[in-house]
Image (spheres, coloured by chain):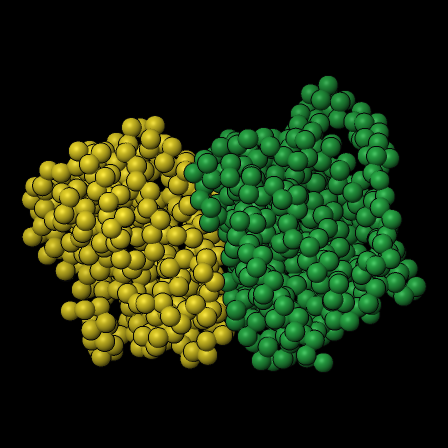
Amino acid sequence: MPLAKRLSYHVMKDLGAPLVMGLAAKSKKKRPASTRSPFGPRLKCAVRLKEIMTRHYFLARYAKGAKPVAWVTSGAPVELLRAFDFYTIYPENHGALCGAQRLGPEYCGIAEDHGYHQDLCSYARIDLGHALSGKTPVGKLPQPDLLFASNNICQTVLYWYRVLAHRLKVPLLLFDTPYNFKDIRREDIHYMVDQLKEMIPVLEEVSGNDFNEETFSRVIHSAKDASLAWGQILETMQHKPAPMTIFDAFVHLAPIVSLRGLPVALEYYQTLLAELRDRIDQGIGAIRDERKRLMWDNIAIWYKVRDFSNLFAERGMNFVTATYTNAWAETSSHMDVEKPFESMARTYAQVILNNSLNHRLELMERLIKDYQVDGLVIHSARSCKPYSVGQYDLRRILMDRLEIPSVIIEADITDFRAFSEEQTRTRLEAFFETLEASF
Amino acid sequence: MTRSAYLRRQKEMGRRLFGVFPAQYPREIFWAMNAIPVEIWDPPLETVNANAHLQPYICSVVRSGLELILQGKARMLDGFLFPHTCDSIQNLASIVNDYLGLEIPCCFFYHPKAPFGKGSRDYYLSQLKSLTGELEKLFEPVDPHELKRRVGQGMDMQKRLADAYELRRMGALAVSNTSFYRNVRLAEYLHPDDFVSGFETFLAVSKGENSKGPAIILSGILPHPEILHLLDQQGVRVVDDDLLNCNRRMPLTLGRAQDPYEILVENYFAMPPCPTRGSPIQDRIDFMMDKVRKSDAQGIIFCGIKFCEPEWFDVPQMVAAAKDAGMKILLLDLEVNQPLSGQLATRVEAFVEMLT
């Protein structure tokens, strides 16, 4: 890597980033908490989270040439890349960020103008829109030296990253994780371990760094600890009242997705966990009057997070668990520094979306019980077929077995052209009535 | 004889029938167990029941396949196979296996995705053997000699199909587009003994100079019968295709190994580039442009299926490459069994006019 680029990166890391973060913090006006607000006190950690993620995207501008850069899917075993010091960008996280800022249709539109069908995943269309125009709300994303995808979350990422590889002329590494129609099999593990080992020479060539198994193990250790901490954070919501909401968790999962394996992720989650435990000790709830506890299924509707957060909180309804946020904690126990490759295979091949629907059904039943859930909101996400196909059956079975009220919202993760405010309101009103009548 | 009448007859003859969803799978293993894989691509049914299980944004291949099961029209089947083709088929497998209360066993077949490493071949081999093991539990142990014979028969079948494609490309097959695809698609459910003899007759009676009309290539998932009919009416020749259920499942070279499983492995890795196997897009473009170069095609019709992600991600790159090569392009966003609307017919006619 060129010395000047490396110097520039380190100057920005040590001096530029703290300066920008400091200015940003000073310019941020704090709104006084309204006494009529249905919410409890804000999480203090939110400020730190913003700093971390802003810093991540700020430094990304200087990463190209200073560090090897990889664009990575959210379910890929990034620990391997960390061992080669890659700067990692998560297009899905960037897509969520664009979605939350209501930029989805604009960026998707750019991709659509280039021929990408409006029915394709909107994370992919946002990313392609960015790749084709350079537009991003974070200033600038570094061009990748490598693309790293795993189809453990969907096959869409494979189709999408093939397009990126074709357009950007960079190598694509796929971690192909056989779908667990039943249990994971020995030959599946062998196949995945072979793939990981075969990636090493490519990663060495692209990064210019040698593979060091000790570093790899250290990264796995850190990733495991962070994932376990994230799991403990989610578990705090088992408490009544829950010290945070799932809408908070949608935001606070950014480090476990984007910075997994880096010390900052672990440090952050330890701080957040301490704050949540403190809130529990003090009896502080995320919403002031938690009367009903809900579960969310599927990815967030990013452009509606705030609206939904208010809508439900005003009714004393708190989302206390979600299958989605759970995904980054569910399999972390498989991580094992003694068996780094095999444990990566086991961890990443057994995530929620790489298993049969029965696996999700069991998980949902467990979460409903553990989190004392009163109702279920299912987001049928047009963009995400592996998450959505089967939801109608899951809902029916859960209603039969547990008699739990539920509602399905037909929407999309970032493209609000696929969202009908009126239809959703009508469905939710009916759901609220059922929920209120169920006790 | 209709497809259902033929299948009933096979059942009466003591053959097993296995319903197979798209797209890549080793049909020879079924044949060796006296079973016929019956592919489920586009059953001609009105969708009524499947909507209770699938959202409106799920493709019509998956929807109509599920409808077939829900209408009780798959009762004669001895099992289902779900190859790992896309997210929707993957989850459909779960719905059918776990939530419909069927007593028909379901098998799942995972095929590795590109870029293929050293372990991919071993893994695919293990999947072939694992599938054999699952079928043996349902039926009886496979006879190695019978497997070898059926793998040989599969190669023979592929060779005849390749011959038919070559003759058509050379303009030496005097058949309509409709007739060509009707005969090729018989491979989706005929027993190989019947297919090979029937296809031989088809080739023998069809050899001859084709009518001289504008030539096109079809791309996409599967041929739409009404579009084929319309092209026939317009005097348009389809000279080649990279359709998923046709040419994209024909190995570019046939296996030469001695062991039948090894041959099946070689054949899988010799399949044309396809997004469902993770092939690089450039490979698929090269595959299509090679067809353009080897034929007198003037245009390409992309017969996409609505909501089909594997296909629609590739289309913009393929269209750009085809346009650069001076090809005329028509993009169709179709549903299986969708009647040809006046608007759609007009678009096809306008496209044909551009060619002429």
Q: Position of residue A349 (x, y in %)?
A: 60, 57
Image height of A397 relative to A325, above or below: below
Report x, y in % for residue B229: 18, 51
Which residue appears at 70% of the width and 32% of the height? A60
Identify the image quadrant of residue A242. Answer: bottom right
Residue B248 visible here: no
- Count the marks: 0
Q: Is residue A398 above or below residue B37?
A: below
Nearer-the-camera pick, A217 or A284: A284
Look at 55% across and 54% down and name the residue there.
A419
Q: Residue at x 75, y 55 (%)?
A: A248
**Residue A30 rendering spot, x and y as whole percentages:** 85, 43
Chain B, colour shown: yellow
Q: Quadrant of the C terminus of chain A?
A: bottom right
Is A49 on the left-hand or right-hand side of B77? right
Horizontal side of residue A172 vs A54, given as left or right: left
Q: Identify by letter the chain in green.
A: A
Relative vertical location of residue B204 with respect to residue A50 in this rendering, above or below: below
Image quarter in which the N terminus of chain A is found: top right
Q: Quadrant of residue A101?
A: top right
Across and down, in percent, residue B59 comes to: 41, 57
- Image position of A156 (left or right of A34): left
Residue at 9%, 46% in the rendered image: B174
Which residue occupies the foreground of this view, A410 or B91?
A: A410
Judged from this view, the residue extending furthest toward the top is A4
Against B341, residue B130 (above or below) is below
Residue A280 versus residue A436: which sits nearer the camera?
A436
Residue A428 sits in quarter: bottom right
Tell which of B169 and A436 is nearer to you.
A436
Please say whether residue B312 is visible from this viewpoint.
yes
Is B236 displayed left or right of A411 in the figure? Answer: left
